[in-house]
Image: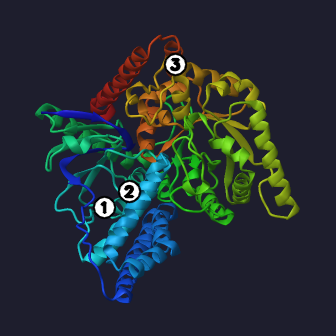
Amino acid sequence: MEIALRGIGVSPGIAIGPALLYGVQTIDVPKYRVNDKAAEVARFETAANEVRKDLQLLYEQTAEELGQSNADIFRAHLMILDDVDFRKEIAERVHSEGLNVEHLIDEYIAKHSRALQSLGDPRFQEKIKDLLDVGSRILAKLLNTTSENLSHLERPSVIVAHDLSPSDTANLDMVNTLGLATDLSGPTSHTAILARALEIPAVVGLRYVGEHTMPGDIVILDGTTGQVIIRPTEATLAHYIAEKKRLEEERKALISAETHRRNVTLDGYEVPILANIELPQEISHSLRNQAEGVGLFRTEYLYLNRDSLPTEEEQFEAYAQVAATFKPRIVTLRTLDLGGDKFASHLRMAPEINPQLGWRAIRFCLERPDIFKAQLRAMLRASIHGNVQIMFPLISGVDELRRVKEVVKEVAADLERRSVPFNKKIKLGSMIEVPSAVMIADLLARECDFFSIGTNDLIQYSIAVDRVNEKIAHMYEPAHPAILRMIHSTVRAAKAARIPCSICGEMAGDPLFAELLVGLGVDELSMSSVAIPLVRAEINEIRMTGAKRFARRLLNVETSAEVRAQLLKRFRARRSVQALLDTSPVQAR
């Protein structure tokens, strides 16, 4: 019987294949008394040192292949392993209790996991997984067992798991891993971050996927929509096989034609398409897809999956690298956007009842000027290496924006006093992602050099839908008439102030919305690099005059369903026209 589940799509693409059920292996840990206590402690130290070598190798490989921010996951594991208190407690208990080290380690892991769990803070879930991962590695060495892993799969499979540790994901058999489906995790979990970096389709937050799946069941996974289908009917399977083939062929055709394409409408209007990036390897992907710059560099990923703040120098090097690589194209650095659904445990941010409305993004930065100023210094220093501009997230009012600009002035003045070079005319912009910012966009525009509409947050705040909650994911609707009107209102305010207005949310990367957004007057579209060829193809097939008429018509539509229906009708019509042109004798000549 076919079962359809919906989770949170965190890495795009369609995967189809047999399920491989993966879980934490249960290790039978013995308990017995030891006579030679010194030898038992030495056995523990030997095993821990062997694990350290394994983790160090994994750290170096991940840094080389996926970038430093992903490698820092394993630096956290090394810190647990090298924790003096951990080693001291185990050694002392061996001497005082005379028990074998495996039993003592197992108790240590259980005790500290329960302590973290009792805090009731979801941010500590990753810490618990880190502790379990390190402990399981040491136990496997001591007991001379082979830990269950995903590095060598017997056949191409969709991995179905309750959760995956960082080691699991980083060690994936890239040839045979078709997709990832997990009960737990969110869009900023280790699993999600690494899946995107590895370009593996992934859906998380499914809650009960393992309970519905048997080993070998055929699973269909759509990492864009968050849909997972177990034991599909022949009709469903045929549909998704055809859809997967169509998407892959369309993408190959688009990429092969990239050198002949520009971001220009049929009537000659240029629509710049930029990339959203967060990881080092995305730079090359963006350039390969001919991104005209970076519309959003999510700098908070430099702060995640590590146990300490990034230094100013680390940040400077990351920003300067991107700026120099894209020079003379624009690179937009967004200041730290932590909080909400993104946490850095080393910052000790207290749990909040409603974190999406809490101490996050620019609010956090203004309360932590030490962190904020270090980041701004790094950004300003990097500005001489390319065409850099800075934007601020979650701005809700003019007073808030002015406070931010004052901090920038302080940092700039300090650099100038110390004769540190930077671009003194660097542009500063505001993200428009809360309803209050839309309502006073005309006032904010007087204080800014540019706007960037963050549709991800704007949608969730405007229609009160948590975008990472799988229970109400179906209600998250970019085609809501209120969203169209908010975008239109913001664009008008920007044009009146003669400043550019871009969109950097997921809506910009959906080809279905390309004509509408262009027609509403959006100046630039910024998206994940994988979406660039598809959106460029849409831009190439529309006329600005027609797009404006279409947008005006949709602004008067009353329901989301009708908006989406008209978008689909228009989208399919362009596909049909293009197919006729491609096969017509006149076109062939």
Residue 198's disc is 2
Q: Amino acid at mark 2?
A: Leu
User: Would residue 356 appear left or right of 426 to someone viewing this image?
Assistant: left
The correct choice, above or below, for 389 with respect to 227 in the image is below
Of circles 3 and 1, the one toward us is 1
Q: Nearer the viewer, residue 316 or 294?
A: 316
Q: Amino acid at mark 3?
A: Ala
Mark closest to the chain's N terminus, 1 or 2: 1
Q: How far from the left and from the top, in percent, is residue 121?
A: 49, 46
Q: How far from the left and from the top, in percent, is residue 27?
A: 24, 66
Mark 2, Cα crowd under 10 Å, few <14 / some 14-19 / many 20+, is: some
Mark closest to the chain's N terminus, 3 or 2: 2
Looking at the rendered image, the quarter that the N terminus falls into is top left
Which secondary structure lies at badge 3? helix
In three-dimensional space, the C-alpha distance between marks 3 and 2, rounded to whole angstroms, equals: 37 Å
Of circles 3 and 2, the one toward us is 2
Answer yes or no: is residue 208 visible. yes
Q: Nearer the viewer, residue 177 or 530?
A: 177
Q: Are marks 1 and 2 in contact (CB under 8 Å)?
A: yes
Q: How far from the left and from the top, in percent, is residue 166?
A: 39, 60
The correct choice, above or below, for 161 with respect to 527 in the image is below
Mark 1, Cα crowd under 10 Å, few <14 / some 14-19 / many 20+, is: some
According to the picture, the residue beneath numbered tag 3 turns out to be 551
* Quarter assignment of residue 102: bottom left
According to the picture, the residue beneath numbered tag 1 turns out to be 172
